[in-house]
């Protein structure tokens, strides 16, 4: 970041472009606040301006103090000890960028900024730009996009361009090819029955197969055999149960007076 290092055009309100610099957007009706230093006397300070314009290029973020720029902007360029008329910071010197929208008051952009050599500031600062009119969120969005592009490529783009979209053509082609193979070569019926058989065995904990077997020269279905085995077990269990005539007579008398319990 630097103070009074923006060269202005003849109207004293528009910045002169650097080499290979392109301005992307600007916003008027902006208030400026910059706090720097550790807070100790002699090592900190505050710069404020109630009315100005913010300019964003592919290289830097600028603020122009309209009133002071019209008075002394043409003669104060490069003079850090003169009254504050401009502020500039390279995009690579901006961090912790955010855009706040409070319930009361103007929306504002907040960021940490670092000093540049011979820029008139020796320590990091907290920058806030308050937008009284429209254009604040657009400036923030473009600035954030430019920061992301610089972090990804390591280069400063000449224009604001969105990140290239991810191509999914290859993935779609693979899905279509796999689907076509599945439709042209479906699984065989025997393989499907084997899968069902394995699931049934796992569920019942035993071999439960509808396949036929040859027992004593006869073709017997395993399902029928298992059902017959179940009927035989039920008959054996019924034989072991006592006959109704052998059961003691029922009585509502208390247990001690019930003759069936004696």
Image: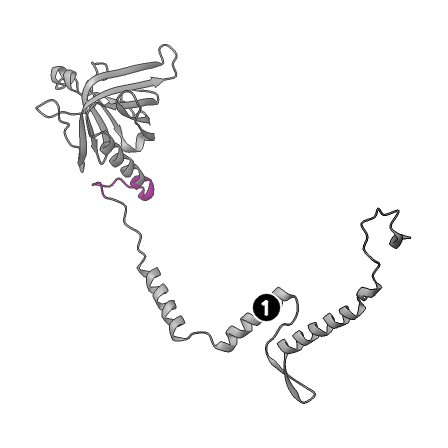
125 sits to left or right of 78: right
Residue 158's image quarter?
A: top left
Using the image, determine if residue 82 lies above or below residue 256. Answer: above
Q: Does residue 252 appear anywhere in the picture?
A: yes
Please give the range of residues in magenta. Answer: 149-161
- Nearest the eye: 242 or 122: 242
Residue 233's image quarter?
A: bottom right
For the N terminus, the quadrant is top left
210 sits to left or right of 77: right
- Residue at the spot 21% in from the left edge and 31% down from the top edge: 56
Using the image, determine if residue 66 lies above or below residue 192. Answer: above
Residue lying farthest to the right in this orientation: 262
- Nearest the eye: 7 or 164: 164
- Residue at the spot 21% in from the left edge and 17% down from the top edge: 50
Could you tell me what secondary structure mostly forms the magenta stretch? Answer: loop
- Residue at the spot 70% in from the left edge and 73% down from the top edge: 231
Identify the element where label 1 is drawn: helix
Using the image, determine if residue 11 lies above or below residue 209. Answer: above
């Amino acid at each position: 970041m630097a103070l009074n290092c923006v060269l202005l055009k003849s109207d004293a309100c528009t910045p002169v472009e650097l080499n290979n610099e392109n301005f992307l957007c600007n916003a008027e009706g902006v208030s400026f606040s910059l706090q720097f230093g550790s807070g100790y006397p002699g090592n900190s300070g505050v710069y404020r301006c109630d009315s100005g314009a913010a300019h964003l290029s592919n290289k830097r973020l600028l603020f122009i103090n309209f009133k002071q720029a019209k008075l002394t902007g043409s003669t104060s360029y490069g003079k850090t000890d003169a009254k504050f008329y401009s502020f500039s910071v390279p995009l690579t010197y901006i961090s912790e960028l955010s855009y706040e929208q409070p319930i009361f008051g103007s929306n504002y952009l907040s960021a940490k900024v670092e000093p540049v050599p011979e820029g008139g500031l020796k320590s990091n600062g907290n920058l806030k730009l308050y937008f009284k009119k429209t254009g604040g969120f657009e400036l923030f969005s473009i600035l954030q996009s430019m920061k992301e592009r610089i972090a990804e490529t390591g280069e400063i783009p000449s224009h604001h361009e969105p990140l290239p979209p991810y191509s999914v053509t290859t993935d779609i082609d693979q899905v279509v090819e796999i689907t076509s193979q599945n439709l042209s070569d479906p699984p065989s019926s025997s393989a499907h029955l084997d899968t069902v058989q394995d699931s049934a065995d796992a569920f019942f904990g035993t071999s439960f197969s509808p396949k036929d077997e040859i027992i004593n020269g006869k073709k017997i279905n395993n399902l029928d055999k298992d059902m017959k085995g179940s009927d035989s077990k039920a008959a054996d269990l019924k034989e072991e149960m006592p006959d109704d005539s052998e059961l003691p007579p029922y009585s509502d008398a208390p247990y001690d007076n019930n003759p069936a319990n004696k």
